[in-house]
Image (tube, grey):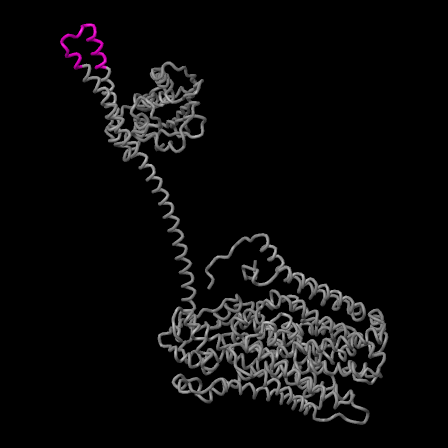
Amino acid sequence: MRLGSRRLFLGRRAYRRRRMIDATRIVPVAFALLVLVPPIWRPQVFSFATGALWLALGWLATIIVTATLHHVIGGTAEGADEDDDA
Amino acid sequence: MTPETLGLAAIVYVAGMFILAHCADRAAAAGRWQWMNRPIIYTLSLSVYCSAWTFYGAVGYASRSGLEYMTIYLGPGIVFAGAWWGLRHLVRVARMHRITSVADLISSRFGKSAGLATLVTLIAVTAATPYIALQLQSVSMALSAFAEEGRPPPGNIPLWTALGLAAFAILFGTRNLAADERHHGVVMAIALEAVVKLLAFIAVGSYVLWGLADGPADVLARIDSMASRPEGAGWTIQPERWLVLITLSGAAVLVLPRMFHVMVVEANDDDRLRQAGWAFPLYLFILTFLVLPITVVGHDLLPAGANPDLHVIALPLSQGQHALAGFVFIGGFSSAMSMAVVSAIALSTMMANHWLVPMWLWLRHGGFRAHRLPGAAREDLRVLMLNARRIAILLIMGAGWTYHHLSGGTSALAVMGIVAFSGMAQVLPALVAGLMWRGATRRGAMTGIATGSAIWLGLIYLPSLGLVPPPAMPAGLDPFAGAVLLSLGLNMMLLVLVSLLDFPNPVERMQGLSFVHAIAPDGSAADSTSSARAEAVLTLAGRLWGSDHALEIFREAAADQGKSGYLPDLTPRFLSEFERTIAGTVGAATAAALMSRVAGRGAVTVADLMDVAGEASLARADNQRLETATGELERTARKLRETNDKLTALSAQKDAFLGQISHELRTPMTSIRAFSEILMEPGLPDRDRPRFAGIIHDEASRLTRLIEDLLDLTVLEGGRARLTPRVVNLHDLIERALALAQATEARRDFAVLRDLPAEQLMVMTDADRLLQVLINVIANARKYCDVPAPQIRIDARRLRNGGTEIDISDNGAGIRPENQALIFEKFSRLTDTPQAGGAGLGLAICREIMQFLGGSISYLPGQGGAAFRISLPRWPRDPARSEEDPPAAEAG
């Protein structure tokens, strides 16, 4: 049972970290949309080289963004508060 | 290069893996395992996702269906992009509860239900059997590609492969029974295999991309040219399949037994997902996009009848690159081996924990009956558990081989993989709901999973075996996608509906809370331990882990509680932790059953849950009360401190006054006595007599005044003064007061600032008393205002409630804040200078008078000098009668 009240406001570093964690929630949604919508919407266009290129670039961008975010967020030990919500 | 040579190479390769795994296990046992506890090892071990199906089958899949093969990688890509918040929660909760498998997770979340564990294990085994058969087939198929024309490859390859892999899995997967299901040797082996298969695929991919084709641009052109060819007809993306397959592969990376095992069970902590979150997608990305050149170049260079599943090997072979082809074979063999071994270990854990051991215990002890179990204490549960797993591994491998043998090998590898995916995906809704929604219940999960998997069995699994015809779907809808949508849709709908209508049992609710919020369960208030015997629990632990290890655990627990020896108190916390530790070995359901019997942990009831909640809220309320009380205490203490300070100051002043009054009394008395003695002298000249008599008279008057003041004060304080109210003009009073106060410091010239018209107020009061106050305040101002151009300002006004206020201020130094509280006290005099002249009673008398008149006098700070406000009520109040008989006019 949690009785202790959580801190309501954070310093600059912790605040930045929280916002980066928020960003990690957006990344999979954005990537899913990128992967799902165009091929479903225009299958004729995205079934061949265009589609391959689109998916390759989109995926690579997602990987880079994820790596950057994970690097910025840092280890679990650095986060004082382990809760997922801000 | 002949199949025999390659077979030999494969055997040597497996032997190498044996040695590596053995060394890693030994290092881990010796505690030297930090170097293999790195995130990179974890990331590489995740590549067990890429089985032989992805190694060989992806190219076949791509040449049949175009980009659709990518769905198998894009799903995990999406899931891992959300590694930080989604997967981390899963891994953290699973570590907290020492989850051993996906079936264990579902079972533990939904009230440690043995039924759910059994069901999920059943689905997993059903789905995995053809999948393992596929791996065996891929090995023999790949070997057959090397066979010369007219010379069939050795026929019993799958059997030997199955036996070899079973031996590996048994040796390194069931070596010991740890409190956590981790296998360092196996993980190291599959991490190395991940590197081998990646290198093999990069080798063949680069060879094709730059050796046979002219780089990426050429490959893209060839892909576009597929659109105009007849084989390209199947390349157009089917939207419903695109959606369904990405969903399925995303689910698969979470719930396939082998993936769950490496991702969750073998994870040391959740922090390594930070690296795996991008590194594993990168691994998949490389594999995915190397498939395309192999596919299109294979199309162009190989004969039309060639099996596209073997393009990876056939392409280098057709160009005479035998060494490269051999390396590729080893890469494919690595994929098959790691998949089969980890699957076998994961499935054997599930089968042993959820099928074999519970059944055996049931048969042996008549259903965990309490009075029978202690008698079985001598038995070594450890051997039982390990043997159950060994048997399970043999069963799984045997089933895979049997399946392969009976089916004679299916033509397309991709189909079986997707069938397995769609089967395990039925677990996903319950998993996700269990981790995110406290309201999901056991019955809901059971209904959803059972219905979904029944539909899967009838519409997907059996048709894939050719036992029943494929289902009829509405025109335009792909049968497979339709069946998956139907099964998953019904699954989710029933899960939600039944959960909404259901009332879960208390254990479920506690587990739900723990899983959704990642809080370690602390055991409920109901865990009455009086009957529990620490020794019985210790015996149970000894039977599971061997008595040395068990004793060590108990000694640590006892030390944590501050006790010496090996028997800790059986507190709810200890029991709860101990149950979770056991669950790490035998699964949550069996652990709960064992504990309930051995330690007397009874069933938790709704009332107990409410107690837990009640205790929590009680504690909160206590906390609140305590805070309020503390606040009150602080306020009181502050007040007391203030009072004390004031009393101390007053006491000091009183002492000073006593000295002062004695002095004041003695000085006139001394002169009276001295001059009366002189008067008694016979020879005193007559002209001196009146002068001395005058001095005596003056001194006596001073004494009288002093005593009158004291008496006045006493009368006022005692409430014995007589009030004689009459109507008087305030202006006249102020005029008189100023005139009478002139006598004080008569030499100084004061500017008096007044608003004469405003002073024309008629007040009903005791005029003499009010005059006394006005004189006193004005005289004080004259006495203490010590600036060169002294001023006295007098403002009078009528208040809305009929009262009157008179402000009298000067432009002097004012009164320091620390003294403001004291000036109205008796005997207080702020300066020691004789300038004051009085005995410090003036303002005290004023205050008493104003109270007596029903009004008040107060000091106004911040007016640029000393300022006093005299407030008069509309009607003077007789203190003796005012309480019970207020004047009628005031009420109106």
Q: Is B541 in the magenta?
A: no
- Image point 72% across, 80% down: which residue? B331
- Where residue B416 sits, quadrant-wise, is bottom right
Q: Position of residue B514 (x, y in %)?
A: 50, 68
Q: Position of residue B144 (x, y in %)?
A: 76, 89
Q: From the viewer's perspective, tell me whether residue A36 is left or right of residue B620.
A: right
Q: How many marks?
A: 0
Quarter of the image for the C terminus of chain A: give it.
bottom right
Q: From the viewer's perspective, tell me whether residue B562 is left or right of residue B245.
A: left
Q: Is B689 in the magenta?
A: yes
Q: From the viewer's perspective, tell me whether residue B404 is left or right of residue B790.
A: right
B307 over B610 or under it: above or below: below
Write down the region rendered in magenta.
B676-697
- Image point 75% across, 86% down: which residue? B142
Magenta stretch, main secondary structure, is: helix
Q: Is residue B735 visible?
A: yes
Q: Position of residue B146 (x, y in %)?
A: 78, 88
Closer-to-camera residue (B526/B203): B203
- Where residue B205 sits, quadrant-wise, is bottom right
**Quick one: which residue is furthest to the left in this view?**
B682
Closer-to-camera residue (B415/B679): B679
Q: From the viewer's perspective, tell me whether residue B431 is left or right of residue B549.
A: right
Q: Is residue B457 visible?
A: no
Q: Position of residue B569 (x, y in %)?
A: 38, 72
Closer-to-camera residue (B564/B170): B564
